[in-house]
Amino acid sequence: MAKPILVANWKNQPGSLAEARALLTQLSRNSKIYKKLSLFIAPPLPYLELVSRYSRNFARLASQDIPSEFQGTQTGEIAPDILKSFGTRLSIIGHSERRAVGETNELVSRKIKVALRSNITPLVSVGEKTPDTDGEHFEFLRQQLKASLAGLTRQAVSRVAIAYEPAWAIGKTAKGAMVPIDLSESVMFIKKILADMFGRRVAERVPILYGGSVEPSNAFALAHETGIKGFLVGHSSLDHKSFKAIAESLISK
Ligand code: PEP
Protein backbone atom coordinates (compact mmCIF):
# COMPACT_ATOMS: atom_id res chain seq x y z
CA MET A 1 0.00 0.00 0.00
CA ALA A 2 1.19 3.53 -0.77
CA LYS A 3 2.74 5.41 2.13
CA PRO A 4 0.69 8.12 3.86
CA ILE A 5 1.45 11.61 2.55
CA LEU A 6 2.54 14.47 4.77
CA VAL A 7 3.07 17.96 3.36
CA ALA A 8 4.62 20.73 5.46
CA ASN A 9 3.45 24.15 4.33
CA TRP A 10 5.93 26.55 5.90
CA LYS A 11 4.17 29.55 4.30
CA ASN A 12 6.42 32.59 4.91
CA GLN A 13 8.35 31.13 7.85
CA PRO A 14 10.77 30.48 9.61
CA GLY A 15 11.84 34.11 9.80
CA SER A 16 15.49 33.61 8.84
CA LEU A 17 17.82 31.24 7.04
CA ALA A 18 19.45 30.34 10.35
CA GLU A 19 16.09 29.39 11.87
CA ALA A 20 15.21 27.33 8.80
CA ARG A 21 18.51 25.49 9.13
CA ALA A 22 17.88 24.83 12.82
CA LEU A 23 14.41 23.42 12.07
CA LEU A 24 15.81 21.15 9.36
CA THR A 25 18.49 19.89 11.73
CA GLN A 26 15.79 19.02 14.26
CA LEU A 27 13.64 17.33 11.62
CA SER A 28 16.56 15.30 10.33
CA ARG A 29 16.97 13.71 13.79
CA ASN A 30 13.65 11.96 13.14
CA SER A 31 14.45 10.95 9.58
CA LYS A 32 13.71 7.28 10.36
CA ILE A 33 10.11 8.20 11.13
CA TYR A 34 9.73 10.49 8.12
CA LYS A 35 11.03 7.81 5.76
CA LYS A 36 7.90 5.80 6.57
CA LEU A 37 5.89 8.53 4.86
CA SER A 38 5.94 10.44 1.61
CA LEU A 39 7.05 13.68 3.20
CA PHE A 40 7.14 16.95 1.27
CA ILE A 41 8.37 20.31 2.56
CA ALA A 42 7.06 23.49 0.92
CA PRO A 43 9.36 26.26 2.17
CA PRO A 44 9.54 29.95 1.24
CA LEU A 45 11.31 30.02 -2.14
CA PRO A 46 14.63 31.49 -0.93
CA TYR A 47 15.05 28.40 1.26
CA LEU A 48 14.63 25.86 -1.57
CA GLU A 49 18.31 25.11 -1.89
CA LEU A 50 18.79 24.80 1.86
CA VAL A 51 15.80 22.47 2.25
CA SER A 52 16.82 20.30 -0.67
CA ARG A 53 20.32 19.96 0.80
CA TYR A 54 19.27 19.21 4.39
CA SER A 55 16.27 16.99 3.77
CA ARG A 56 17.50 14.92 0.81
CA ASN A 57 17.55 11.86 3.01
CA PHE A 58 13.97 12.00 4.32
CA ALA A 59 11.80 14.47 2.36
CA ARG A 60 11.09 15.87 -1.06
CA LEU A 61 10.65 19.47 -2.06
CA ALA A 62 7.32 21.11 -2.74
CA SER A 63 6.35 24.63 -3.75
CA GLN A 64 3.50 26.68 -2.32
CA ASP A 65 2.37 27.81 -5.76
CA ILE A 66 3.25 27.54 -9.45
CA PRO A 67 2.88 30.03 -12.32
CA SER A 68 -0.19 29.87 -14.54
CA GLU A 69 1.91 30.04 -17.73
CA PHE A 70 4.40 27.39 -18.73
CA GLN A 71 6.74 29.76 -20.53
CA GLY A 72 7.30 33.44 -21.23
CA THR A 73 8.85 36.30 -19.34
CA GLN A 74 6.98 36.89 -16.09
CA THR A 75 8.45 39.32 -13.62
CA GLY A 76 8.10 38.07 -10.07
CA GLU A 77 7.25 34.47 -11.02
CA ILE A 78 9.39 31.37 -10.66
CA ALA A 79 9.41 29.24 -13.80
CA PRO A 80 8.42 25.59 -13.31
CA ASP A 81 11.79 24.58 -14.76
CA ILE A 82 13.56 26.43 -11.96
CA LEU A 83 11.38 24.72 -9.36
CA LYS A 84 12.17 21.41 -11.02
CA SER A 85 15.88 22.09 -11.05
CA PHE A 86 15.84 22.25 -7.24
CA GLY A 87 14.00 18.94 -7.11
CA THR A 88 10.43 20.19 -6.59
CA ARG A 89 8.03 17.25 -6.93
CA LEU A 90 4.73 18.71 -5.75
CA SER A 91 3.02 22.12 -5.86
CA ILE A 92 0.24 23.32 -3.61
CA ILE A 93 -2.27 25.00 -5.93
CA GLY A 94 -5.31 27.06 -4.99
CA HIS A 95 -4.56 27.47 -1.29
CA SER A 96 -7.31 29.50 0.39
CA GLU A 97 -4.80 32.20 1.31
CA ARG A 98 -4.09 32.64 -2.42
CA ARG A 99 -7.76 32.42 -3.34
CA ALA A 100 -8.37 35.17 -0.76
CA VAL A 101 -6.14 37.52 -2.77
CA GLY A 102 -7.90 36.84 -6.05
CA GLU A 103 -6.92 33.40 -7.32
CA THR A 104 -9.90 32.07 -9.26
CA ASN A 105 -10.85 28.50 -10.15
CA GLU A 106 -9.91 29.34 -13.73
CA LEU A 107 -6.38 30.31 -12.65
CA VAL A 108 -6.18 27.19 -10.50
CA SER A 109 -7.16 25.11 -13.50
CA ARG A 110 -4.36 26.66 -15.60
CA LYS A 111 -1.81 26.11 -12.83
CA ILE A 112 -2.78 22.43 -12.52
CA LYS A 113 -2.03 21.99 -16.23
CA VAL A 114 1.32 23.77 -15.92
CA ALA A 115 2.27 21.49 -13.00
CA LEU A 116 1.28 18.34 -14.88
CA ARG A 117 3.20 19.44 -17.95
CA SER A 118 6.23 20.01 -15.71
CA ASN A 119 5.89 16.58 -14.10
CA ILE A 120 5.11 18.14 -10.75
CA THR A 121 2.19 16.70 -8.74
CA PRO A 122 -0.52 19.32 -8.30
CA LEU A 123 -1.93 19.26 -4.76
CA VAL A 124 -5.18 21.09 -5.37
CA SER A 125 -6.57 22.81 -2.31
CA VAL A 126 -10.36 23.09 -2.01
CA GLY A 127 -12.66 23.94 0.86
CA GLU A 128 -15.51 26.11 1.97
CA LYS A 129 -14.95 29.53 3.53
CA THR A 130 -17.23 29.33 6.55
CA PRO A 131 -18.40 26.51 8.83
CA ASP A 132 -21.69 25.05 7.72
CA THR A 133 -24.10 22.70 9.43
CA ASP A 134 -26.78 22.23 6.79
CA GLY A 135 -24.67 20.79 3.99
CA GLU A 136 -24.41 23.91 1.82
CA HIS A 137 -20.65 23.52 1.65
CA PHE A 138 -21.13 20.44 -0.53
CA GLU A 139 -22.40 22.61 -3.36
CA PHE A 140 -19.47 24.98 -2.91
CA LEU A 141 -17.05 22.05 -3.01
CA ARG A 142 -18.73 20.63 -6.10
CA GLN A 143 -18.32 23.89 -7.98
CA GLN A 144 -14.71 24.38 -6.88
CA LEU A 145 -13.76 20.86 -7.92
CA LYS A 146 -15.61 20.97 -11.23
CA ALA A 147 -14.11 24.30 -12.25
CA SER A 148 -10.61 23.55 -10.99
CA LEU A 149 -10.38 20.14 -12.66
CA ALA A 150 -12.19 21.15 -15.85
CA GLY A 151 -10.61 19.92 -19.06
CA LEU A 152 -8.41 17.25 -17.48
CA THR A 153 -8.31 13.79 -18.95
CA ARG A 154 -8.72 10.69 -16.75
CA GLN A 155 -5.05 9.99 -17.15
CA ALA A 156 -4.13 13.53 -16.08
CA VAL A 157 -6.40 13.57 -13.04
CA SER A 158 -4.92 10.33 -11.77
CA ARG A 159 -1.69 12.33 -11.28
CA VAL A 160 -3.45 14.93 -9.11
CA ALA A 161 -3.87 15.00 -5.33
CA ILE A 162 -6.58 16.93 -3.49
CA ALA A 163 -6.25 18.75 -0.18
CA TYR A 164 -9.55 19.34 1.58
CA GLU A 165 -8.84 22.47 3.58
CA PRO A 166 -11.86 24.36 4.89
CA ALA A 167 -10.62 27.96 5.03
CA TRP A 168 -12.31 28.45 8.43
CA ALA A 169 -10.16 25.69 9.94
CA ILE A 170 -6.82 27.05 8.78
CA GLY A 171 -4.29 28.66 11.07
CA LYS A 172 -5.92 28.16 14.46
CA THR A 173 -3.41 27.32 17.19
CA ALA A 174 -3.79 24.47 19.67
CA LYS A 175 -6.14 26.36 21.97
CA GLY A 176 -8.49 27.53 19.28
CA ALA A 177 -8.06 24.61 16.85
CA MET A 178 -11.31 24.02 14.97
CA VAL A 179 -11.59 20.98 12.75
CA PRO A 180 -14.56 19.45 10.91
CA ILE A 181 -16.52 16.91 12.94
CA ASP A 182 -17.75 15.22 9.78
CA LEU A 183 -14.52 14.94 7.81
CA SER A 184 -15.38 11.50 6.44
CA GLU A 185 -18.57 12.90 4.84
CA SER A 186 -16.63 15.60 3.00
CA VAL A 187 -14.02 13.08 1.86
CA MET A 188 -16.75 10.78 0.58
CA PHE A 189 -18.40 13.67 -1.18
CA ILE A 190 -15.13 14.68 -2.90
CA LYS A 191 -14.68 11.06 -4.05
CA LYS A 192 -18.21 11.07 -5.43
CA ILE A 193 -17.60 14.25 -7.43
CA LEU A 194 -14.37 12.79 -8.79
CA ALA A 195 -16.19 9.57 -9.68
CA ASP A 196 -18.96 11.52 -11.46
CA MET A 197 -16.37 13.45 -13.43
CA PHE A 198 -13.76 10.80 -14.18
CA GLY A 199 -15.14 7.40 -13.18
CA ARG A 200 -14.82 5.35 -10.00
CA ARG A 201 -11.47 3.77 -10.78
CA VAL A 202 -9.79 7.13 -11.28
CA ALA A 203 -11.52 8.59 -8.20
CA GLU A 204 -10.07 5.80 -6.06
CA ARG A 205 -6.57 6.67 -7.24
CA VAL A 206 -6.67 10.35 -6.30
CA PRO A 207 -5.29 10.80 -2.77
CA ILE A 208 -7.31 13.13 -0.56
CA LEU A 209 -5.41 14.95 2.18
CA TYR A 210 -6.83 17.00 5.01
CA GLY A 211 -5.46 20.41 6.06
CA GLY A 212 -6.56 22.90 8.70
CA SER A 213 -5.29 23.14 12.31
CA VAL A 214 -3.86 19.64 12.42
CA GLU A 215 -2.26 19.30 15.84
CA PRO A 216 -0.79 16.38 17.82
CA SER A 217 -4.02 16.42 19.87
CA ASN A 218 -6.38 15.91 16.92
CA ALA A 219 -4.17 14.15 14.34
CA PHE A 220 -5.04 10.60 15.36
CA ALA A 221 -8.81 11.15 15.11
CA LEU A 222 -8.46 13.01 11.81
CA ALA A 223 -6.25 10.29 10.33
CA HIS A 224 -8.37 7.29 11.24
CA GLU A 225 -11.52 6.12 9.49
CA THR A 226 -11.99 9.39 7.68
CA GLY A 227 -10.77 8.22 4.27
CA ILE A 228 -7.84 10.65 4.10
CA LYS A 229 -4.44 9.59 2.77
CA GLY A 230 -2.46 12.27 4.60
CA PHE A 231 -2.19 15.79 5.93
CA LEU A 232 -1.24 19.24 4.71
CA VAL A 233 0.13 20.95 7.81
CA GLY A 234 0.80 24.64 8.33
CA HIS A 235 1.80 26.04 11.72
CA SER A 236 2.44 22.66 13.39
CA SER A 237 5.05 21.88 10.73
CA LEU A 238 7.25 24.62 12.20
CA ASP A 239 7.47 22.85 15.55
CA HIS A 240 9.57 19.71 15.21
CA LYS A 241 7.97 17.94 18.19
CA SER A 242 4.41 18.56 17.00
CA PHE A 243 5.32 17.59 13.48
CA LYS A 244 6.87 14.32 14.62
CA ALA A 245 3.73 13.48 16.63
CA ILE A 246 1.53 14.21 13.59
CA ALA A 247 3.75 11.99 11.43
CA GLU A 248 3.42 9.19 13.95
CA SER A 249 -0.38 9.47 13.91
CA LEU A 250 -0.32 8.96 10.16
CA ILE A 251 2.07 6.03 10.34
CA SER A 252 -0.20 4.27 12.83
CA LYS A 253 -3.02 4.34 10.25
C1 PEP B 1 -2.42 25.47 5.57
O1 PEP B 1 -2.32 26.70 5.55
O2 PEP B 1 -2.32 24.79 4.54
C2 PEP B 1 -2.68 24.85 6.87
C3 PEP B 1 -3.11 23.62 6.89
O3 PEP B 1 -2.44 25.65 7.94
P1 PEP B 1 -2.64 25.27 9.49
O4 PEP B 1 -2.14 23.87 9.69
O5 PEP B 1 -1.83 26.28 10.21
O6 PEP B 1 -4.10 25.37 9.76
Image (cartoon, grey):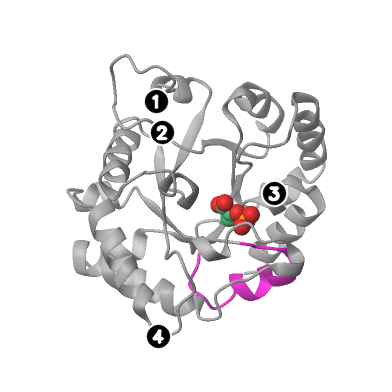
**What are the residue bounds of the magenta stretch?**
213-228
Front position among marks 1 and 2: 2
State which mark lies toward you, 2 or 4. 4
Q: Position of residue 13 (x, y in %)?
A: 68, 37
Q: Nearer the viewer, mark 1 or mark 4?
A: 4
Q: Which residue is mark 1?
A: 80
**Of callouts 3 and 1, the N-terminal one:** 1
Residue furthest toward the front?
A: 101
Residue 96 x/y as whole percent: 46, 52
Q: Which mark is residue 66?
A: 2
Q: Position of residue 147 (x, y in %)?
A: 24, 55
Q: Residues within 10 Å of mark 1 (few under 14, many from 20)?
A: many
Instruction: Measure the alpha-carbon separation of dots 1 and 4.
Output: 41 Å
- Ligand 1 is within 8 Å of the C-beta of the residue at disc 2: no
Say whether disc 3 or disc 4 marks the residue closer to the N-terminus: 4
For mark 3, what is the residue? 237
- SS for dot 3: helix
Q: Residue at the spot x=41%, y=33% of the render?
A: 66
Marks 2 and 4, how far apart at CA? 35 Å
Nearest the viewer among 46 and 53 is 46
Q: Provide the residue designation for mark 4.
A: 134
**Residue kind at label 3, given as amino acid type:** Ser
Decide which of tag 2 and tag 4 comes sooner along the chain: 2
Q: Residue at x 71, y 68 (%)?
A: 176
